[in-house]
Amino acid sequence: MSVRKGNLMKEIAQVKSKITDKELFTSWAFKHHLKIIAETVSRRYKRPIQVKIIWDEDMPLAAATNNQVICINANSPLLKFLSLREEKYVAILGLLAHESGHILYTDFSAIENYLTAMKEGKWYPEPPEFEDELLNDNLLKVQEAMRAGKTKALRYAAKQLDNIFEDVYIERELNQAFPGSFREGLDLVVQQIWETMSTIPEMIEKECPDYAIMQNLILSYVRYGNVKDAGYRGRIMDDFLELIPILDDVIGASLSERQMVVNSLLVRLWGYLEPLEDKLPNEAENPASADGTTAIPSGRTRSVLGRPGTPAGGSSDDEMEEKRKETAARLSEEETDDDSEGDSGVGENGDDDVKSSEGGRIPHAETSDISEGDGGGVERDDEYEGTGYEKAASDIARILTTVATGKVSEAHERVRTKDLSAFANSLDYGDAHRGVTFRIHRIPTVNERLIDQYNAIAPALIAISKRLQKQIKQHLKDYEQGGKRTGLYIGKRMDARAIVRDDGRMFYKTNLPIEISQMAVAVLCDESGSMGWGDRVTTARAASIILYDFCTALGIPIMIAGHTESSSVDIYSYAEFDAYDWNDKYRLMDMRSRLNNRDGASLKFVAERLAKRPERFKLLIVISDGQPAASGYRGSVAEQDLRRIKQEYARRGVTTFAAAIGDDKKEIHRIYGDGFLDVTNLNQLPVLLTKLVSRFIKK
């Protein structure tokens, strides 16, 4: 069942070279990597962030958050335009940064209150005021529409404009707080959005509504300080030029001030919005619902693609201000052409959906099954000169190795399970178990649920293991190195230099070197139904976690298995002597109470596995809360069978101890004799068993 390390590494290398972008970016390893980055960012603010990765070519969504979970579409149009895997990775970091910024800095409640008030026909925080007579006329028309409940277009525009200004704010905050990989990722995303953005003539050719063109101008100006006018001049540009002073004022404004600017823009753009009222889907806050994605019931989700924020290249605020001034001057000084194509046929197509004409923007969306999702350190790769993020290549290489290792390990684990089943069925269990069948259960691929459960409880348990390791490591060092032990009360050799001592400690002996690798440990845990009482199985699981960490840290081979009986004898393999990965500690979280217990057959299986080990010293620990209780296997016959198996393997060098954690301690003592361990206090079990291994080592 063992695989040579060299062959395993070759398999991993072969699989690694064939992993697709979809396999990489949707893998648990990649999601775990992003989760660690997100947690690192959110820790200082004490805001938990969860990450979900999807791969959906039909969904234009690039990334979204509902204020708790970040969902990133690794196959969105934004990422498809990037040919290099390293660039896609950096762009995903940028999307993660942007959505993390919303979780850290966006006031979702205030924005929801703003949109809710508008839906109810109210201005929030207060109505806009104008001195211009024409704008006051527009204000009356808007208020009349609000009283009539015709607010779809207003709410849609309010949400989009709010997003534009909110993004400016959160990305400014992000760049100040996290100038490293987040800044680099954001720069790439912003640059890519600009490159894929449609020009005004292109949007007109697509028969985009006037408001979509206007919104794209606002977005471009606020984010980049520039617009892709491509020489277009016409009514839309004239109206946009009048908005520039207002847009300049929104930079650096507070949330309430930004909302007041949005209110002002809604009135100023009423002529663009009014024709959209009957064209928008019913859920105006989420036009993406027309594409089959889930609508947003609360209006709290933020999404990104083509959203404004930090200027491309990471320009400073002063540089952005200069860009805006130059753009405003250029547009206002150039001659306008009243006969341009700007007013021809725009918005005449009544079937045209606003969401399809935002020049690269992706509408808001909220997935109904959004859920949570460790990459370690990264190595610097100074050879890579792509996006400017120097760690992208090494990050991806490491994650690819993790993904490939998982795929290879899973294949070998399935073969291992077949081999274990064949091994179990090859044994002669004696008359007491004649006709009994075996089923071997082993999780081939550890899932996130087990990992999260382990990480939640492990730190305190591992601390116990580390403390016990520290106590025995010096002892092990002495035995492994050999040497002279002095100051003994008795011995065959007298230390001449200690004769003058008056405490009698005058003897010494020379220790021969001992290899700790000459020891192997196996643990067999009862998983009968009664183990569910009084935290018995919980304590057994904790003891197994500590023992596993203790032994692996000291280089001691260890296997841990659970057993029960249903229609067959069920063996649950948690930790194996020859592991293909480091996930056995997570498999231990699957230990639980189940059905009956046919102890003899299970003991035979584990004892035989241990007896075949090459190590000189073999320790088998049985954790049980009662005597055998299975169909046709109980009472004195079962006890006699267990004593026979214990004695048989004692002759083959296997020392067995039974930790009694239930009410049948008398019976268990009768079965295991000098190998009986009375665990009166369940809380003592983990330390007791680990110290048992320590004593066994010292012998």
Image: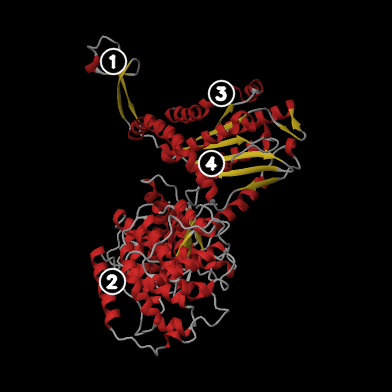
> Residue lying farthest right?
632
Label 3 to label 4, Cα distance in Å? 22 Å
147 shown above or below 325: above
Query: Three-letter amino acid code at disc 1?
Result: Met
- Could you say which disc has been placed on residue 324 in the image? 2
**x 41%, y 40%: residue:** 553
**x 39%, y 49%: residue:** 42
- Comparing labels 2 and 3, the label whose residue is closer to the camera: 2
Q: Which residue is mark 3?
A: 679
Q: Tag 1, which secondary structure?
A: loop
Q: Which residue is mark 4?
A: 559
- Could you say which disc has been placed on residue 44 in the image? none
> Residue lying farthest front?
133
| Residue 285 appears in view | no
Q: Who is closer to the viewer here, 625 or 318? A: 318
Q: Tag 3, which secondary structure?
A: loop
How packed mark 2 is, by other alpha carbons closer than 10 Å (few <14, some 14-19, many 20 or more), is: many
Q: Which residue is mark 1?
A: 506
Query: Three-letter amino acid code at disc 4?
Result: Met
Is disc 1 in contact with disc 3, using a CB cutoff of under 8 Å? no
Query: Three-letter amino acid code at disc 2?
Result: Arg
How packed mark 4 is, by other alpha carbons closer than 10 Å (few <14, some 14-19, many 20 or more), is: many
Q: Name which quarter of the figure residue 224 lies in.
A: bottom left
